[in-house]
Amino acid sequence: MAQDIAINGDNAIALAWKQIDPDVCAAYPITPQTIIVEKFAEYVANDEVSTEFVCVESEHSALTLCTSSASAGARTFTATASQGLAYMWEMLPITAAMRVPLIMAVANRAVSGPININNDHGDAMAARDCGWLMLFSENVQEAYDMSIIAPRIAEHHEVQLPCMVNLDGFVLTHAIERMTTLDTQVVKDFVGEHRPLYPLLDTKHPVSHGNMDGPDFYYPHKYQSVLAMQKALEVSEAVFADFKRISGREYHLVEEYRCDDAEYIAVILGSSFGTMKATVDLLREQGLKVGCAMPRVYRPWPMEALAKLMAGKKGVVVYDKHLSIGSYGPMFPEVVAAASDLEKLPKMYNVIYGLGGADATVSGFEKSFKAVVDGSAEKIHYLGVRL
């Protein structure tokens, strides 16, 4: 039965995994993701799930095992963060190229150095070009919901791609919030039975995975992944609609807040979307026509939805919780590209904020957003940096 509970983000994801009951889970602990696999290991130890839980000696081993497991045909989950995701990097594009729909929770954390264990999006952004689907969560409820939604998108036979479910480290992983669960049978019925495509263990129909690709096949195979990503946009919208029917909770490729009549909008990811909503409310009280949006689906990049959102706006300010040193925030050029076919390009700004867990506050967002509206903002602004 659905019920309201108080729970942190890591435990919410572990609960979703318990309700799904995947075939295999392999992971290596790293803060702030550790609670997910610790809690899920308890479920395994208590025979509350039938999952084969594999303790491994590193994150690289975890993803290698998970990729092999998923290739064999098992529904497979894992989790990591920061340096752990970096240690997996060699396997990230291999996993995607093998088209195995495994699910990985990523508790977003700064990538060292300097050494830092707090939240920003440096880990996920460094992995964005590896061919994985990427979903982002604003709060604990969404981290739970995205964990249930992710297998439906990833395992769709016209998608067949691995998926990262991102939640902000500590801000969501460790913060306790109110959340409404779904009945376990409802979750199982929604996710459905796993029907792997070309599994290695289907001995009656032998296949080989992970073969050498020469120039004649490497490029076409990459393009097939492009087509799968494009399909994932359509599949995501259909799965979001199905999820609304069982939960009443509505999700979109791009979440919008007070954007319809806005002259200026902010684009932002993760838990900061909530802070930005509060900022928008404050600025609206001051008479400023502003709104904000969050790309729920970051990969595939929802270009058309964002272009529609930005059409007719005077200005767009992209808030990046990561920095491509020597260039911009990573999301900024992608938003600019999405707007490039508009009849009139809005003025575009980039605000870098929150690196290494630096505070993301309403007052900081208010100041930077007002500077955009009154025309005094620099094109690239480093919010709150102390020198």
Image: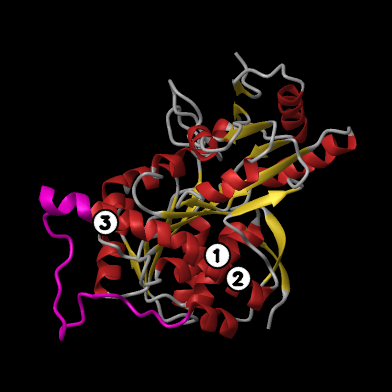
Amino acid on which the number 2 mark rests in the picture: Ala
What residue is disc 2 on?
241
Q: Earlier in the sequence, mark 3 or mark 1?
A: 3
Main secondary structure found in the magenta portion: loop
Closer-to-camera residue (209/350): 350
Up-down relation of residue 217 to residue 378 (above or below): below
Closer-to-camera residue (9/45): 9
Q: SS for tag 1?
A: helix
Q: Write the residue at 60% across / 22% down.
A: 382
User: Is residue 11 visible in this depiction of the protein?
Assistant: no
Closer-to-camera residue (312/110): 312
- Residue 364, position in %: x, y? 73, 29
**Residue 215 forms part of the magenta stretch:** yes
What residue is disc 1 on?
237
- Residue 223, position in %: x, y? 28, 53
Amino acid on which the number 1 mark rests in the picture: Glu
Marks 3,1: beta carbons within 8 A = no
Cα distance in 3D space between marks 3 and 1: 24 Å
Write down the region rendered in magenta.
192-220
Amino acid on which the number 3 mark rests in the picture: Ala
Marks 2,1: beta carbons within 8 A = yes
Up-down relation of residue 341 to residue 222 (above or below): above
Q: Write the residue at 38% across / 54% down.
A: 132
What residue is disc 3 on?
97
Would residue 313 be found to the left or right of residue 153 on screen? right
Cα distance in 3D space between marks 2 and 1: 6 Å
Would residue 115 be found to the left or right of residue 88 on screen? right
